[in-house]
Image: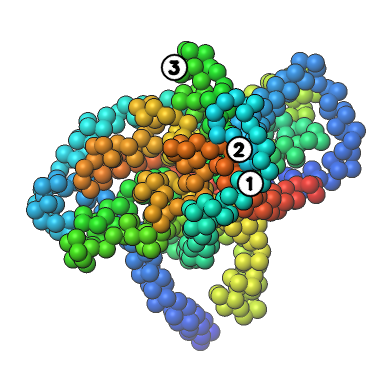
């Protein structure tokens, strides 16, 4: 009962909203005028400041740089000389990235593998745990807490903790296998055909708990009478989940999908603490970063890489926004 | 009499038909206990390794029963890497960042949820979308911006946003504001409109309505978000890595990678260092887990 608080809140949400939808929609315009006219001059200034400062900061430090990335990606600026040194070179950066920049295709491939691994293994596993734990059962809170524990850790720390398991001669696995001698050891984090998978297991350790918690909240908001109805109609547990629960939970499914994609594209910390994102662990995020803090500061080129990352993520961000705010527009 | 026995038999039968659930329950528990053991294992292994002196593991191997267990690795990691200094760096960033994020986000959420301006929805979408961008999308121009934006000397020893605490705090605030605005505005929408309308009609100013009426009602989501933001900002690795050049000024999570290379020569020390760095978030986990989860799910369960 107590762990239903989050959903108690969220399921309480629609009521007041729909409650005011009727009269508010009917008298929307006059009501608004009436309300605004209540405001004094000072009130209006306060409102402008309350809205203006946060919006200014957000635009300046998030959206201005986003636009900056797009514009700079068509230039050859290397950061030397002022803004006047910036020359437009069309899509040359993109051409170079696709044709003569060796790390790009591996990085893109690694990002896609990362996404695939999360999407088809880690995320479903998290959802599976959520379904298992979403019942009145002794110890369910303890199980949830344990599976959730890694979510508290930064991916950088996760990298360090798993290094103790993967390290070549001091690591757990090789010691268990008895392969700690230089000629027999398995270099889990150094072998470019192994290390991405080793890192993905470590990153999933955290991701599974994250998805589980999100999905549990969604499941708790699920109307139990629907499940009872399905049971009366003779559906078994699996049928009930796939034919009734899963479709109804479309909103949370979309959240889970977007979280999975964004986390896969953001992945950076764990490969950076492992080997700075080289030798089999190249990711788009690492390439972008290397073009700023690496030896060669190629602003235009780095921006073009960032735009590629933006384009991939934008589709999912828009899906999420449309899904989330459509309901609001209707009220 | 007979009716009773029939009823009893019925009950027994009902219990019997319910019985077959029990083995599957036991199976479920067995599976979950196994899974949880696997899940806890990496952390327990780190704790175990950290408690063993290097000499002990060198002699007996890492997979072995301990000869000696002590806290020497923790003391060494604490001293050699000057961890207190880096905890302090983090504190200087985390506290103002949380306060500013919550204050500014509650401003926007208040206006958007209490007044029907035409741009409300667009604004809310802008903030939410901003929070979903991968950090690397904005980092290149942001880095140049930080190198160009001046700050007074008393706020930054470099005279710039770059390599300054103000700079790191600013990007956390700008970036995290999106999520907090989204959560808070959803929460504020559940507070009846009549409440603020009455206050305004009674002549309360907009500021008083915000400060004395709405904000006190928002304590639950604010507490949840503060917990969540503490963990996220504490765990930040990327912003400080790129925008804070001086290693000694970096917060602890970003500093760990350098410190490990410099001071942590064996796995036992790495384990102790990693656990020490993780300790504040583990404390949050133990004490405020419910708040954390609530903050996380408040943002996601709104269909």
Q: Position of residue A248 (x, y in %)?
A: 66, 64
Q: Position of residue A198 (x, y in %)?
A: 37, 60
Q: Residue at label 3?
A: B157
Q: Chain of mark 1?
A: A
Asked if badges 3 and 2 are on one and the same chain, I answer: no
Q: Is residue B124 left or right of residue A125?
A: right
- How far from the left and from the top, in percent, is residue A113? 50, 62
CA–CA distance in space, label 2 to label 1: 9 Å
**Rendered view: B148 above or below A175:** above
Tag 2, which chain?
A
| As drawn, B93 above or below A264 | above
Colour mode of the rendering: rainbow
Q: Residue at x 80, y 49 (%)?
A: A330
- Tag shown at residue A76: 2
Q: How many marks can you see?
A: 3
Q: How far apart are the alpha carbons under marks 3 and 1?
A: 39 Å
Q: Which mark is residue A92?
A: 1
Can you see residue A263?
no
Image side of residue B33 versus residue A247, left or right = left
Q: Residues within 10 Å of mark 1 (few under 14, many from 20)?
A: some
The answer to whether the residues at label 2 and label 1 have Cβ atoms under 8 Å apart is yes
- Tag 2: Cα neighbours inside 10 Å, few (<14), some, or many (≥20)? some
């Amino acid at each position: 009962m107590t762990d239903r608080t989050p959903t108690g809140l969220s399921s309480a949400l629609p009521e007041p909203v729909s409650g005011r939808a009727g009269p508010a929609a009917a008298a929307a315009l006059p009501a608004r005028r009436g309300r605004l006219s209540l405001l004094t001059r000072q009130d209006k200034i306060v409102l402008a400041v309350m809205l203006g400062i946060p919006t200014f900061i957000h635009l300046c430090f998030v959206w201005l740089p986003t636009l900056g990335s797009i514009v700079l990606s068509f230039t050859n600026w290397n950061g030397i000389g002022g803004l006047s040194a910036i020359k437009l070179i069309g899509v040359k950066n993109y051409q170079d990235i696709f044709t003569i920049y060796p790390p790009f295709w591996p990085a893109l491939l690694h990002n896609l593998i990362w996404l695939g691994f999360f999407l088809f293994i880690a995320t479903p596993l998290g959802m599976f745990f959520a379904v298992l734990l979403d019942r009145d059962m002794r110890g369910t809170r303890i199980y949830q807490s344990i599976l959730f524990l890694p979510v508290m850790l930064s991916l950088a720390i996760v990298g360090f903790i798993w290094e103790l398991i993967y390290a070549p001669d001091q690591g757990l696995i090789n010691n268990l296998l008895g392969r700690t001698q230089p000629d027999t050891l398995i270099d889990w984090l150094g072998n470019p055909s192994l290390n991405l998978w080793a890192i993905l297991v470590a990153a999933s350790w955290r991701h599974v708990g994250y998805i589980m918690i999100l999905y549990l909240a969604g499941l708790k908001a699920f109307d139990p009478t629907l499940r009872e109805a399905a049971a009366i109609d003779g559906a078994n547990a699996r049928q009930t989940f796939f034919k009734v629960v899963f479709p109804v939970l479309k909103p949370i499914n979309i959240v889970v999908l977007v979280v999975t994609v964004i986390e896969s594209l953001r992945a950076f910390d764990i490969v950076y603490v492992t080997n700075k994102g080289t030798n089999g662990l190249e990711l788009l995020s690492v390439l972008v970063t290397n073009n700023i803090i690496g030896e060669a500061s190629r602003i235009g080129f780095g921006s073009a890489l960032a735009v590629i990352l933006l384009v991939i993520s934008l589709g999912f961000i828009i899906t999420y926004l449309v899904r989330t705010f459509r309901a609001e527009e209707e009220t | 009499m007979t009716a009773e026995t029939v009823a009893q038999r019925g009950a027994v039968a009902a219990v019997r038909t319910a019985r077959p659930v029990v083995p599957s329950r036991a199976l479920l528990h067995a599976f979950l206990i196994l899974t949880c053991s696997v899940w806890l294992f990496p952390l327990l292994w780190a704790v175990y390794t950290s408690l063993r002196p290097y000499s002990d593991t060198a002699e007996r191997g890492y997979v072995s029963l301990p000869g000696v267990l002590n806290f020497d690795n923790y003391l060494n990691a604490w001293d050699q890497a000057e961890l207190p200094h880096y905890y302090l760096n983090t504190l200087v960033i985390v506290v103002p960042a949380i306060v500013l994020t919550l204050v500014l986000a509650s401003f926007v959420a208040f206006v958007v949820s209490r007044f029907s301006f035409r741009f409300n929805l667009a604004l809310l979408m802008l903030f939410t979308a901003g929070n979903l961008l991968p950090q690397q999308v904005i980092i290149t121009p942001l880095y140049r911006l930080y190198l160009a934006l001046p700050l007074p000397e008393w706020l930054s020893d470099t005279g710039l946003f770059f390599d300054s605490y103000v700079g790191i705090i600013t990007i956390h605030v700008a970036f995290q504001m999106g999520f907090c605005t989204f959560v808070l505005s959803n929460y504020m929408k559940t507070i009846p409109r009549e409440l603020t309308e009455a206050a305004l009609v009674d002549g309360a100013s907009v500021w008083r309505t915000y400060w004395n009426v709405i904000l006190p009602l928002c304590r639950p989501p604010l507490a949840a978000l503060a917990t969540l933001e503490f963990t996220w900002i504490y765990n930040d690795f990327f912003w400080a890595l790129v925008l804070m050049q001086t290693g000694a000024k970096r917060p602890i999570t970003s500093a760990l990678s350098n410190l490990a290379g410099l001071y942590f020569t064996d796995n036992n020390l790495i384990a102790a260092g990693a656990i020490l760095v993780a300790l504040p978030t583990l404390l949050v986990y133990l004490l405020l887990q419910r708040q954390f989860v609530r903050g996380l799910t408040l943002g996601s369960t709104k269909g």
